[in-house]
Image (cartoon, rainbow, N blue to C red):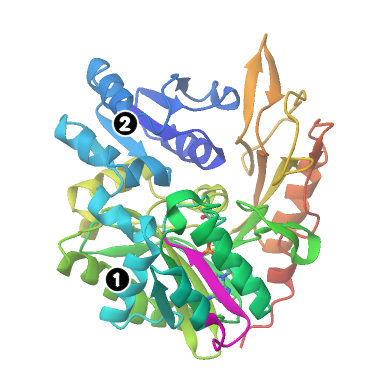
Amino acid sequence: MKVMVVGSGGREHAIIKKLRLSNEIDEIFALPGNGGMAKDATCVNVGAKDIDGLVKFATENAIDFAVVAPDDPLVLGAVDKLNAAGIECFGPVADAAIIEGSKVFSKNLMKKYNIPTAKYEVFTDMDAALKYIKTAPIPTVIKADGLALGKGVIIAQTRDEAEDAIYSMMEDKVFGDSGSNVVIEEFLTGPEVSVLAFTDGNVVKPMISSMDHKRAFDNDEGLNTGGMGTVAPNPYYTEKVAEECMEKIFLPTIRAMKAEGREFRGCLYFGLMITPDGPKVIEYNCRFGDPETQVVLPLLESDLFTVMKATARGELDKTEVKFSDKSACCVILASKGYPVKYESGFELTLPETDAESEIFVAGAKLDDGKLLSAGGRVLGVTAVAENLETAIKNAYELTDKVGFENGFCRRDIGRKALNAEVK
Ligand code: AMP
Ligand code: GLY
């Protein structure tokens, strides 16, 4: 079978490495992929947002199955168009991907179906938003409606900051049209948990839980990034919390999507906060998380391709999704200056990995046989071990063997999880 994976980051590399273990797959293409995955897949120079280009490649090359990993092509309808061309896909159609594509949609969905989330108001008019903010409880959270590369969320600690956020989103359009509508919501507190779940629209099978580290520097300082590292499982996601999430969040969400005529098939990402009043949804993503995937998939014991096909075909009830009881840690090596301004083109030398470690390449290109950095987040160094402490230790030992002059990483990935006091 010929499989194509759409996307170019560390998440896609982790998906590709896992798919390579399937006996059924003969060839994997990455569109566009990156130079660091060239050993694992044939990289094809078609951008993830070039939907017509994706369909053309798939049909001309008799692709049997496509995995569409990033949010943009999903929201733009890549799966709809590939399906129309007869290509089976893992990933939601555009009508379902809206659960990430529009925060207004997802908040209204949760309100309508009683799914626990922060209280909120939607504004399409800037003056109304400014007026509301004069009396809203502080801190407050302001979110641009559409996709904004994970950056469209501002936590305002004062009313002035809240006003600035509204002006910048609704007047200066710093997030483009994403900011035409804004959601202003209640500030919640508690540990955050990411749960990725396979769902075929009827059945939902959560993967092992994980914890992201979004800020650029140690102790959660610095700007928000795409994610500087992850660990799995997340100690705050106890069995009791998992049961409550299944009953009050996961099943109600997939039923709500079905009831709305937007059946979701693919990986649904639940960004949760375990608040004093129980778990609540902070955000939905219509895809695998990055870098959550880099710790979750190495712990998957079932065959990923089998699970993806069952998800696409509505046969998830008959398919086992089994995880190892080990732990994993992924440390992101980023370019100095990320997430603001950074240089690329630094040579990367990667140490050998073993059965319990992997280096996922997120931003690199091959130049005359040399691997050069090409992006903000460059590598995801992952180790799997019997317990979290060893996984963290091994991930950092491997990270320290990487040659990357311009690189930096957080040194505290997993510390919060290790120190977690869970009731
Ligand atoms: P998002 O892009 O929606 O995941 O938001 C980015 C980050 O902002 C989340 O990971 C949370 O840490 C934080 N955040 C978002 N919404 C809220 C909220 N209602 N209360 C507190 N923190 C939030
Ligand atoms: N790690 C967060 C995300 O994938 O959106």
Q: Residue 86 versus residue 294: which sits nearer the camera?
A: 86
Q: Is residue 71 magenta?
A: no
Q: Residue 98 versus residue 264: which sits nearer the camera?
A: 98
Q: Is residue 139 magenta?
A: yes
- Identified at 41% across, 47% down, the residue is 71
Q: Label 2 belongs to which residue?
A: 51
Name the spot of residue 300 as percent of width and height, x first. 46, 51
- Position of residue 400 in the picture relative to residue 25 (left or right): right
Badge 2 vs badge 1, beta-carbon distance below 8 Å: no
Name the spot of residue 245 as percent of width and height, x first. 40, 77
Asked whether mark 1 and ligand 1 are closer than 8 Å, the reply comes as no
Up the image or down, 82 lies above or below 414; here it is: above
- Position of residue 10 in the picture relative to residue 405 (left or right): left
- Identified at 54% across, 37% down, the residue is 9
- Position of residue 351 in the picture relative to residue 11 (left or right): right
Label 1 environment density (alpha carbons within 10 Å; few <14, some 14–19, many ≥20): many
Q: CA distance from mark 2 to mark 1?
A: 28 Å
* Eye-nearest disc, 2 or 1: 2
- Identified at 62% across, 32% down, the residue is 363
Q: Amino acid at mark 2?
A: Ile
Q: Which mark is residue 253?
A: 1
Magenta-colored span: 133-145
Dividing the image into 4 quarters, which one contains the C terminus?
bottom right
N-terminal of the pair, mark 2 or mark 1, is 2
- Position of residue 287 in the picture relative to residue 54 (left or right): right
SS label for mark 1: helix
The quadrant holding residue 390 is bottom right
